[in-house]
Image (tube, grey):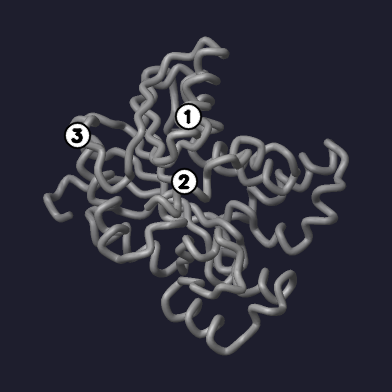
Amino acid sequence: MQELIDQYTGVDEDGRLTRQLITQMEFDTTMHVLSEYLAAGTKVTEQGAATGRYSLKFASMGCDTTAVELAPEQVSILKRKANEQGLQLDIYEGNACSVPFVESNSQDVCVILGPLYHLQTQMQRDQAIREAHRILKPDGIIAVAYISRFFVAGMFAQQSAQLITPDVLSTLLETGLVPSKLADSFFNVGYFATPAEMESLVGKHGFTKLRHVSTDGFGRYISFGVNNFTQAQYQTWLNYHLKTCDEPSLLGSSNHGLMLAKKSNSDRV
């Protein structure tokens, strides 16, 4: 766990979603998909809130927001930013697998936009989804983001040829892990899923799928073009992307995928 905390210490995680148009599209797509479930008074918990790019947005919309983040430095930055912006939200240092400070059946929405990138065991992934199920009201909404292992393989081919080895690719394909010393430390502490796996994970813990979207589409492969768009071109491309992001054939090639599902009223978890 300390290795993961170290990965997010001294990192401009907040700027990640703003410094390039391709990452702005990830944020804009996620907010577009979530927007119909967010309104003033909505009780929303974000697991893995980092420095608050999403949680602060939720709070600014009038949502009753709880932000949970593992890395102490990021928690401190989030608290400072909330104070600077005059926003009220509950902020906790904690782990997505266990949030005992959030009451059962109390939340309208649970957003998990980072933890599934790093929960490397099936037990941890199950715990995170069970905990989301616990805190959500009946018919509450879960939103789970993940990084596609198929995209990661493609990125290695494009940017890190030293990782194109039988061992690295077979391990990634079979387990979603990249334990190679030749890889950046982010990949060593990462977990990379398949779209089908995410649907199965959410489904087996008492949720019914609503939407499954590619938050980047194939945009990462054409990032040079996207990042050099004018603002008008970006908006045109974003509008096109939002019309196609539900296309199943795009899921594996997208850097990030996002699953939205509704808590069923059964006791199955």
Quick one: SS at disc 1? helix
Residue 101 visible, this orientation: yes
Q: Residue 113 carries which label?
A: 2
Provide the residue designation for mark 3.
105
Disc nearer the start of the sequence (1/2): 1
Locate residue 51, reporting x and y percent.
Answer: 53, 32
Residue at 20% from the left image edge and 42% from the top image edge: 134
Q: Where is residue 142 in the image (x, y as percent from the top left)?
A: 36, 44
Looking at numbered disc 2 in the image, what kind of residue is underneath it? Leu
- Regarding mark 3 in the picture, which secondary structure is present there? loop
Horizontal placement of 179 versus 90: left or right?
right
Q: Spatial distance from mark 3 to mark 1, Cα to Cα?
A: 20 Å
- Residue under label 1: 55
The residue positioned farthest toward the bottom in the image shown: 166
Q: How many marks?
A: 3
Which secondary structure lies at badge 2?
loop
